[in-house]
Image: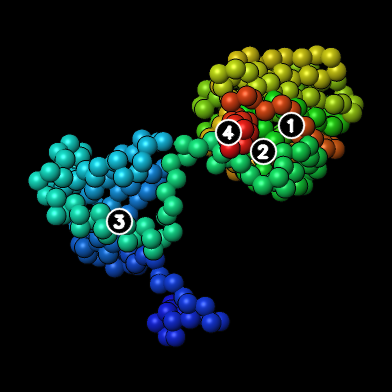
Amino acid sequence: MGVPHPSTVSGTRHGVPVKDIDGVSFAPVLRDASHPSTSPEQYAEFGGNRGLYRDGWKILTNHRPGTPFEDAAWELYHVDEDPNEIHDRAGELPDLVRDLAARWERLAWENTVFPLDDHSDPRAELRRPADGVYGEAVTLLPGTPKLERWRSSRLTQLRSFEVVIDVTVAEGNSGVLVSHGDQGGGYVVWVDAGRVWLAVNEYGELHETSVPVPSGRRTVRLHSAALADFRTTWTLEVDGSSAEIPEVWALLGMAPFSGIDVGVNRGGPVIWDNYVAHGSWRYSGTLHSVRYEPGERAPYSPEVLAEIARDSAEVFD
């Protein structure tokens, strides 16, 4: 508090020009509910869709992927009087539209929005070859911090994969062996009452199954098979006994939202009832390791489509 921003002193830091502060304080609004907004405008952009709010007015474009960005006309709404944005007033007030559109473009340049990308080119999913290491098999040990979300998704998303769990089970042992995700979607394997359980949270719809687990050092295998049409089959196996959760929707996008945990379910729980009863439910026995072995990617995965698009472009070039 009270420290001057470098841009107001010399304009540089270590010889490099300092950017202006992006944003304004809303402290006055917190101190006085009747204080007018300290942020009278806000620009937005996602996938080529653009918008700007200023002083009760809003312009926006609805961009169709794969079409020129200039083809999307600006719409204008007086959201102070028309919060549902029913009446497009662009035709009535073209000067206001031009003024707001120019302001949007200025803010877009200042905030590195350009070049616009509507994600219509599958080649945008291509990554440098060195990133392929993130999709290779990995062994996680007890006490390992949660494997971060993106790294976890490289092992599991839109592909078949197997999880090999090396665990010693004794009478009375219980708790989570591996968990990935939360209430919005994910899966968890745990031990309780002499059985190994699997639950898949299909975007809020819960599917559960289990198999008996004898005492001793055991290998628990979880197999997820990517099927056509974004479907997945899950199989749990211990000592020749197996159980299946067939044909559920594949987990993708924002699910699983959190990464992989071994021996515990930190953060948001995959199963709410387990959290209410046991909290993060750290495994009470000896968990030796959890190994993720990624398999074939689904033919509709972004990575596969990107490679097809790249190879096709090279042929025509």
- Provide the secondary structure element on which disc 1 rests: strand
Q: Nearer the viewer, residue 258 or 106?
A: 106
- Provide the secondary structure element on which disc 3 rests: helix
Q: Is residue 314 above or below residue 208?
A: below
Q: Answer yes or no: do the residues labelled 2 and 1 have beta carbons within 8 Å?
A: yes
**Nearest to viewer (mark 4 / mark 1):** 4
Q: Which of 102 and 29 is in front in this view?
A: 102
Q: What residue type is labelled 3?
A: Trp
Q: Answer yes or no: do the residues labelled 3 and 2 have beta carbons within 8 Å?
A: no
Which quarter of the image is occupied by the N terminus? Answer: bottom left
Cα gap from disc 4 to disc 1, whole angstroms: 32 Å
Q: Residue at x 19, y 51 (%)?
A: 97
Image x and y of residue 197, in percent: 71, 23
- Provide the secondary structure element on which disc 2 rests: helix
Image x and y of residue 164, in percent: 80, 29
Q: What residue type is labelled 1?
A: Pro
Which quarter of the image is occupied by the C terminus? Answer: top right
Q: In this view, does 149 lie above or below 197?
A: below
* Residue identifier under label 2: 154
* Residue identifier under label 3: 104
* Residue identifier under label 4: 316
Checking the image for residue 47, the label placed there is none
First-in-chain label (4 vs 3): 3
**Nearest to viewer (mark 3 / mark 2):** 3
Cα gap from disc 3 to disc 2, whole angstroms: 36 Å
The answer, for residue 266, to whether it is visible in the render is no
Q: Residue at x 52, y 78 (%)?
A: 16
The coloring applied to the image is rainbow
- Provide the secondary structure element on which disc 4 rests: helix
